[in-house]
Amino acid sequence: MSVTEMFSNIQGFLTADQDIREDIRKVVQVLEQTAREILTVLQSVHQPTGFKDIPSKCEKARDLFCTVKLHIADIKTKFPPEQYYRFHEHWRFVLQRLVFLAAFVVYLESDALVTREEVVQFLGIEVTREKGFHLDVEDYLAGVLILSSELSRLAVNSVTLGDYNRPLRISNFINELDSGFRLLNLKNDPLRKRYDGLKYDVKKIEEVVYDLSIRGLAREPEAGREK
Amino acid sequence: MSKREGDGSPRKRKTDVQDRDMNTNLSSPVLAAFKVFQQELDTKHDKYERLVKLSRDITIESKRTIFLLHRVTSVPDVEEVLVESDAKLDGVRQKIGQIAEELRGEDLNQFHRAFTAGIQEFVEALSFQHFIRHRTLISLEEINAKLVFMREDKKDHKDSAEGLSMGAAVLTFHVTPTDYLLGVADLTGELMRMCISSVGNGDMDTPFQVSQFLRQIHDGFSYIGNTGPYEVSKKLHTLRQSLAKVEDACYTLRVRGSEIPKHMLADVFSSRAVLIEPDEGVA
């Protein structure tokens, strides 16, 4: 094989690769749009009208997740399943956001941390790599960390909106999350940097709880109590 | 605010881990889940580290092979150098076999960054040796054909009448087209050095052969242009410089070669300020 032929073959490979990536990019764009719609719905809980109406917001978000499932099913068709990590960078960001959104819905509904198994059901994908398009554990963790920032904001806003109980529940939730993260041996990678933000969320929520306690505004948190 | 952030020394970390693990209330589903995450992440990171180590070994041995191969321009027995390089490259091949072993059942793209440097260096060394022997460019298929490893499959004890083939597993490692391109790009730097040093030894043929070859490679890269990954485009710049040096050398030989005694040719090139930086073309 001559040098020219060699490079011609490689060019063929590179072009084919570019084409696949272009296809994937298009679907990811649509997926990101849907993710933004879900975010818009859920962010309204920080305001008075949304705050009173959390269950219906969650339901609306769940509906939109059906569309998410369709888009992801579409992405799956663009490449061979065993090459997930070759193209992973294209959807990593939006997938992390979707994990966060699913976690937010589950938190608003039940004060609990969404499990990996529950998230993949939201998205219509697998838990383990061997089974196909899956959720990488680091993407799951990144999404959970985005949730912690959102909850520290919610703690502040719930007080403003008159709910003095929610911050205490958020505090318990975040502290347990923090304990969980401390079990991990993280490398100096983007996940580690994101995790470093968790301590600021913890601090912020502690301050909210402190503000409430010294003014006698908060009772002891009781599990499942909604106000 | 807790000071135990887990970013202290390794010794401190070990006690931290033991403390953490002992105090973990595993009846909490969240903490139980994170314990699982810890194991998954640790397993993955450990594998990544093993691959990085293998990659480093491969890089070092490949670089040494390249240094060895440069001696063909100055020693009488070229074959001896080539035989020695075969042995070295075989050692590198074995390391790649270990990489293939680690990647068994895994998605190699997940770990690619761990070993890409080593693989590129290997491609560079192998293609350099191939050029010295055959004056042609080794193809990606030829490289991958060398990276087939037979492994005894110890798990499967099928006593069959068909013989050994039932018990052996075949492991392959595929060099990606990108790693191949990057390795060949680095090869051009070595070829440039070889060209210049061969002139100094009165070799009048090699410079023109190298020049011709380098030009073909350069044309190939130009054809690919910016459609390749970013790293390839970066190396194109260095490649152009190497090609220019080689073409200048050929020009000098052609124009002035007959005037100058062979033993002074090397001086001619250094006086024309053909500077060779030590690590040119190496990422």
Image (cartoon, coloured by chain):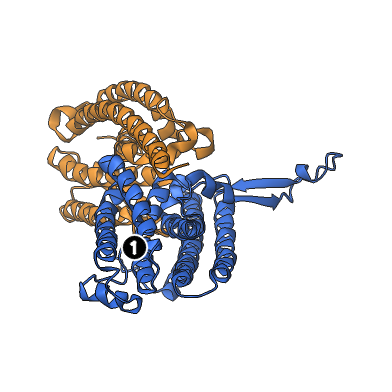
- Picture layout, residue A119 above or below residue B228: above
**Chain hosting mark 1:** B
Residue A187: x and y in percent read 38, 60
Residue A213: x and y in percent read 20, 53
Q: Which residue is mark 1?
A: B192
- Please tell me how many numbered marks the rendered image carries: 1
Residue B187: x and y in percent read 39, 58
The residue nearer to you, when weighing A15 against A71, is A15
Q: Colour of chain B?
A: blue
Q: Residue furthest front?
A: B258
Q: Residue at x 24, y 71 (%)?
A: B275
- Could one spot residue A221 in this view of the protein? no
- Could one spot residue A166 in this view of the protein? yes
Q: Colour of chain A?
A: orange
Quarter holding residue B282: bottom left
Q: Using a 10 Å C-alpha cutoff, classify the residue at mark 1 as few (fewer than 14 neighbours), some (14 to 19) or many (20 or more).
A: many
Residue B268: x and y in percent read 25, 75
Q: Secondary structure at mark 1?
A: helix
The residue nearer to you, when weighing B107 against A149, is B107
Which three-letter amino acid code belongs to the residue tagged 1?
Answer: Met
Quarter holding residue A33: top left
In-image side of A26 versus B187 (left or right):
left
In-image side of A94 versus B41 (left or right):
left
The residue nearer to you, when weighing B237 against B269, is B269
On-image quarter of the C terminus of chain A: top left
